Image: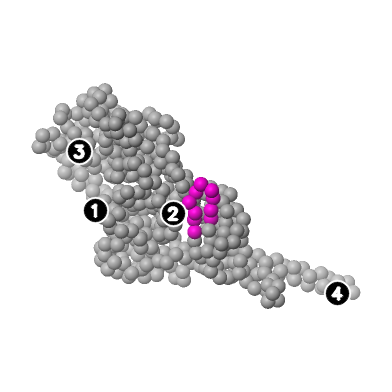
Amino acid sequence: MRYISRLLLFGLFVAILILVITYARGYRLDVKKKLVTATGIIAISSSPKAAKVYVNGELKGVTDINITLPPGKYTIEVKKDGYMDWKKNISLKGELVMTTDATLFPQNASLTPLTNLGVGKIISIDQTGRHLLFSQTGNEEKDGIYVFDQSKKPFSLFPPLKLLILKKNLPADIDLYETKVTFSPDYKEGIFEFLVDIQTIAYDMGFDEEVKAPFDVTTSQVSLSQAWKEEREREAVKILEALPKDMRAIASDSFHIVSFAPDKTKFLYEVTKKEELPPIIIPPLISANQETEERNLNPGDLYIYDIKEDKNFKLDIKEEDFDPSDIERYIIWYPDSQHVVLNEQKQTSIMEYDNSNRQVIYSGPHEQNFLDIALDGKLLILANLNPQTNKSPDVYAVGIR
């Protein structure tokens, strides 16, 4: 009798264990069909939090939330008052957990002034969080080149700028707004080219301290620029070597990389030769991005490749919206590496790297020849909100988060 009791207890334990494992793997009892069927889980989070979640138009709760559903196709919508809606179509499989993270952008962006110099030209120092500002308003004590470093401290009203060089310490009659800058591979210094009469004068200046007497490199400019170019090419080779083997050959022969996402898991590239991108990860990842990808590469088109998931997406953009000769200035990675910002002719848009959830985030006044993204996700623009009083624009932060 004692052995029978132990056997029954053991059988009960095994049965409970099987039920727990079955439940954990997503199996549920379908009362109508009187069957145990596999289900999946959709884990939905958002920024900001406490946004409403709709599945096929039915309110299911607020983020963050896990929703158990039978296999099938679903439309997920995330909504919050004051923000633009987010939407995604997914195909859920049994025993699978799908994770979605919705980034919501406000319907009305805010503007915050960051300078009061009068800035006629601004150049981004790659993805370092620093910018060169050029001011030429006729004020001898203020006109010059400044380094704006928003990576060291949070934004505040009129943050201090670091003066690089005053215009009065440069040759007379130069136009600062015509300055050309070539950066060193480490982005710690640059060759500044100034046009004086019909001659070009070049100076090498570092960005760490104020320059009183710039170092003239006019005669050695070509050799120095060539050395920097060769070093960049060596770095580019290292980047290609880090790609999967099958991708490496295609990358070197059929396209060139425009820019990497901040976390280096994706890259934007332009195709130069017709090619078909073969599958790199076999079999495909079960929980990979489900948006429609394109692996037939056509010359002149732009694509984003996801290294971790082996997914390739053709960017749905029109040539009239940007200048193909200066792609990096018109298509900019957002700091989360999940979005790209498009500097279009009359507006600024943002979309996920797979083309989904494209939205206009700013269409107010700004100088179209400049747009950048701050490390905290704000847009950086040049704008003159009072042209009757101010001769030159200034730098503004556009709050979109």
Q: Amino acid at mark 2?
A: Gln
Q: Amino acid at mark 4?
A: Ile
Nearer-N-terminus badge (1/3) = 3
Q: Amino acid at mark 1?
A: Ser
Say if the magenta span includes residue 79: yes
Say if the magenta span includes residue 314: no
Q: Nearer the viewer, residue 283 or 345?
A: 345
Label 1 crowd (10 A; few <14 / some 14-19 / many >=20): few
**Residue 27, image x, y percentages:** 65, 69
**Residue 337, image x, y percentages:** 42, 52
Which residue in the structure is indicated by mark 1?
325
The residue most toward the right is 1
Q: Judge left or right: residue 64 versus residue 384.
A: right
Nearer-N-terminus badge (2/4) = 4
Q: Amino acid at mark 3?
A: Glu
> Of discs 2 and 4, which sits in the foreground?
2
Rounded to the nearest whole Å, what is the CA distance between mark 1 and mark 3? 19 Å
Which residues are drawn in magenta?
Answer: 78-87
